[in-house]
Image: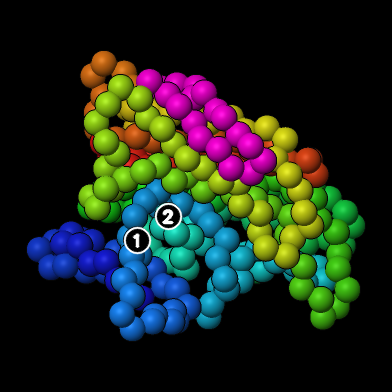
Amino acid sequence: DVFHEVAGAQEEFPDVPAYLNSFSQPAQAYVAGRTYHESWNTGVFGPAFVTPGPGESGLNRTANTFDLEPTLYSDDQGRSASSTTVAAFMRLSRDRDVIYEGEGQAGGFDVPAADGRYTLFIKTDRNTVAGLSTHNEISWRFRSAAVPEGVTQKLPVSVVRFRPTLDDHNRAAAGEFDVIGFTVQRQAGATPARTASLDLRVSYDDGRTWLTAFVVRVGETGFALVKRPPAPTGYVSLRSTVTLTDGGSTDQKIIRAYRY
């Protein structure tokens, strides 16, 4: 496990390092005499589907109940992760009916048995001392109907995992272009679906304006290319829309995804 503490994470004690975020993974076996390299606490910090651990269940349905516990700040390796936030808002709706709207980023909700089209929207803000992923939004659209009692069904949702090449300070190399690798990740155990289209946009002014990236995709992986503006601010923000062959879609936005 890795725990990241930063001075200023707690407003009442601005000079004392306090918990900001953490990452964990299952126990690993290492062979004596060999050298291993692992990347920890490397961005982009964003949504991912991880191997469930205590208190983590992903996005599930059992009978007529949604159990929603997404991982929103995983690292580039897709590890189990958590982070403190200063604001969190969630809205769950079915067709045009709002089931829940208010504070939070997880919870259990009763839903109708009949098939319907759902939208789950979550946005969170982190303390600015985090430096990166200071604002995170995701919106999943998918269909769901009742499942038998005692059966847990993984909801049919996907995320885009952004993986630019970053150094040990989470900075991309200097240059004229940003090259952003990505993978569309399906929640494990969900009904399979492929990517039908992916739109990726990049901002260099914290989301005030967006540039359309040139996307090269083979299956569920690829990269995006965008030319940096003449006077950049030093941060790259990312926004994406992926549509899926089952009719679902995912919108994501990460402000200050990485530095350069």
x and y percentages locating residue 84 in the rendered image: 36, 63
For the record, the magenta segment spans: 209-227
Residue at 37% over, 51% down: 43
**In the figure, residue 18 lies in which quadrant?**
bottom left
Q: Residue furthest top?
A: 230
x and y percentages locating residue 103 in the rendered image: 50, 57
Are there few (<14), some (14-19), or many (20+) residues within 10 Å of tag 1?
few
Colouring convention used in this rendered image of the protein: rainbow
Q: Is residue 242 a member of the stretch shown in magenta?
A: no
In the rendered image, which residue does mark 2 sit on? 76
Which label's residue is closer to the chain start, 2 or 1?
1
Does residue 63 sit above or below 89 in this rendering?
A: below
Q: Which mark is residue 39?
A: 1
**In the figure, residue 146 lies in which quadrant?**
bottom right
Could you tell me which secondary element the residue under label 2 belongs to? loop
Q: Nearer the viewer, residue 86 or 213?
A: 213
User: In this rendering, would 124 be left or right of 245?
Assistant: left
Residue at 63% over, 37% down: 218
Does residue 223 sit above or below 119 in this rendering?
A: above
Instruction: Name the amino acid, label 1.
Output: Ser
Are the residues at dot 2 and dot 1 in contact (C-beta closer than 8 Å)?
yes
Are there few (<14), some (14-19), or many (20+) residues within 10 Å of tag 2?
many
Number of marks: 2
Q: Nearer the viewer, residue 140 or 230?
A: 230
**In the figure, residue 29 lies in which quadrant?**
bottom left
Q: Which mark is residue 125?
A: none
Instruction: Name the amino acid, label 2.
Output: Asp
x and y percentages locating residue 253 in the rendered image: 48, 40
Could you tell me which secondary element the residue under label 1 belongs to? loop
